[in-house]
Image (tube, rainbow, N blue to C red):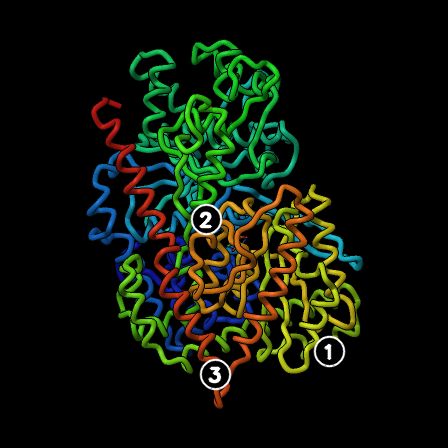
Amino acid sequence: MIKGTTINLHDRLRALAQNLWWTWHPEVISLFTDLDPHLWRQVDHNPIAFLNQITPEQIEERASELVLHSRINYAFRRLNEYVEKDKTWGMMHCGNLNNRPVVYFSAEFGMHESLPIYSGGLGILSGDHLKSASDLGVPLIGIGLLYQQGYFNQSLNKDGWQEENYVNLNINNLPLQPVLDASGQPLLVRIDTRSGPLSARVWLVQVGRIRLLLLDSNVDCNSSDDCALTSRLYGGDDRLRIRQELLLGIGGARVLQALNIIPGVLHLNEGHSAFAILEESRRIMDYDQIPFHRAHRRVTLRTVFTTHTPVAAGHDRFPPDLVEEHLGIFRENLGLSHDDFMALGRINPYDKSEPFCMTVLALKSSCRANGVSAIHGTVSRLMWHSLWPQRPETEVPIGHITNGVHVLSWLAPPMYQLFETRLGQDWPTRMVHPDIWETISEIDDGEMWETHQSLKMRLIRFVRRRLQLQAERLGHSDTLKQIDQFLDPDVLTIGCARRFATYKRGDLILSQAERLAKLVEDTSRPIQIIFAGKAHPRDDEGKRVLQRIAQYSYSPASRRRVVFVENYDYNLARHLVQGVDVWLNNPRRPLEACGTSGQKVVLNGGLNLSVLDGWWNEAYDGRNGFAIGYGGMHNDPNVQYLRDANYLYETLEKEVIPLYYERDAGGIPHLWVQRMKHAMKSLGWRFSADRMVIDYAERFYLPAASAVSTVTR
Ligand SMILES: *Cc1c(COP(=O)(O)O)cnc(C)c1O
């Protein structure tokens, strides 16, 4: 950390920009917006790009005009204090992880729109995990991949069909520092495969107190194909996929070795990184001169595995030839035959037709495994029962820890300030205690409603700006003329944003067009809907669902009240979850593993309207939001679709809309606001990432770390 008073403002701002701590500190963000609001928006909220476009002299000048010196110095001091603080939850409770930290592997990390190395929920969850581990002071290191083209930018054509655009990120505009080896050269890790070596360099991203190490295959010694290996998330075929996972798992574990970091716990967030188990086993074999099965057993004791999807296609499976090509040399070093090796990833070790499944490897090699909500735990035990055929289903060793969100990243600053007046200044450090949230009852209904309305207005202005750009590109001249009439802050506003996987049924609310039209066009109590979300580039069925919504939103009758905003990302998500009245989530039960966007909504005063699946199945208490149906399922997805559609309309017509429009003389919907407050109180602490990380630490990390403290390494 840079210290002292000799460094100038530009350097201080650069130090702030280099640590993603700024992303959850609005007082730092406001420094940049105050310095140059136009430039800040132009660089897509990227402080490094911002500083690369403005000279130290310009900063001094602007700071003097605006009297920003003391605010910049204060922010800089706060960052230093934060990083050096030693009285944290982790210091008090996780002492035995200090020398041997948790290493958290994930194929994606979503921390902010300016570092687009995530595609959706899994990445946002990993980012929130790092941020909460940082706030709590849990000793943890993240391992991921640097994608030079990120996921993709989405635009829709005139027919409402999704088009994908890829742009190369400019490394100089990202908060990356090269990781160097002992001789001061850029650290390179190398993996030998039957088709030649594969190398990667390593970057460090600082996330508060936490280090995130990203592998990047774009190095001279790789072939041009391999240079592009890490350019996109989830692109390409199985071969590209296994090569990415080789880098993440084996490459990631080798980075740790090069930096002399011995993991106390391996936490595999999803199966993509499961090869790390094997590399860690190899290290122990070498060090202790023991055979593979003993080393593997030892690694298993301290491996934690989190599975995220009840959908079969979400689990990577590789055919034997790809495994042999990429891991043949490696398995010879482990002293394993091809069949022995394949058996590690097979449910039935002797079934030669079975591919190598990363989830199976992870489940066989971890003593602690979990799904991400209570219902997902149950679904996962059923799904993987065949791995433990001798046990009853309830005894399958997969538990659950329900996901949560990083509160300070998702809570809008005006709502934060409102909380502060009742919960006390230090509430963020005590947010996992339910009792401090009780004081939310004391917030005046009018004040709460006004804060919410101002956030909704902010969302509407943001959406109109985006719709204007879309309409200009598509040549929708009628839309352009009316843009100021799009969306009305006094109308019940429903947000519906998600990945357009078919099981999420994004178009459920369109299924009975006349019934929807009645709700949208009602003169006294109308609704409006803001849609957003990306379909996977190769998921044509998902794209068709998206197209149906887009076309509906283009039609003259509904376009002022039903809109589709392109390019769902962190920024759009933040505006949406902070500004909507109602968050609609209607996946096909029980296929939603958890869902976290509804948790972000709760913090900001929105109410959930959701199928009883994922987190909502355990969160809904009858008074903190709305349920679609009663948790029923049907073998025929079409029957379930029709039923759920009916439940959805019914709940809207009979519960949501009447409650929303029931106002006092001053226009305040008191019963609605009661629900908002009750949701915040009953859910805010429970579905925070702080609670989640503490659960992982107490139930998994600490027991796993002490399981091996008796052995030497
Ligand atoms: C929170 C978030 C998600 C997760 O969405 P769910 O549908 O609730 O799982 C996905 N994408 C972005 C950008 C998010 O912020």
Q: Name the disc covering residue 638, or none.
A: none
Does residue 53 show up? no
Between residue 603 and residue 185, name the one nearer to us. 603
- Measuring from the top left, give residue 458's x and y in whole percent: 54, 74
- Disc nearest the viewer among 2 and 3: 3
Left or right of 433? Residue 47 is right
Mark 2 and 1 residues: CB-CB less than 8 Å, in contact?
no
Query: How far apart, in angstroms, are the residues tagged by discs 1 and 3?
Result: 29 Å
Mark 2 and 3 residues: CB-CB less than 8 Å, in contact?
no
Q: Is mark 2 within 8 Å of ligand 1?
A: yes
The disc, 2 or 1, on the residue closer to the chain's N-terminal end is 2
Residue bearing the label numbered 1: 482
Query: How far apart, in angstroms, are the residues tagged by discs 2 and 1?
Result: 38 Å
Instruction: Give amino acid for label 3.
Output: Ile
Instruction: Give amino acid for label 2.
Output: Leu
Query: SS of the residue at dot 1?
Result: helix
Residue bearing the label numbered 3: 668
Instruction: Give amino acid for label 1.
Output: Gln
- Disc nearest the viewer among 1 and 3: 3
Instruction: Single out the residue that lies furthest toward the bottom.
Output: 665
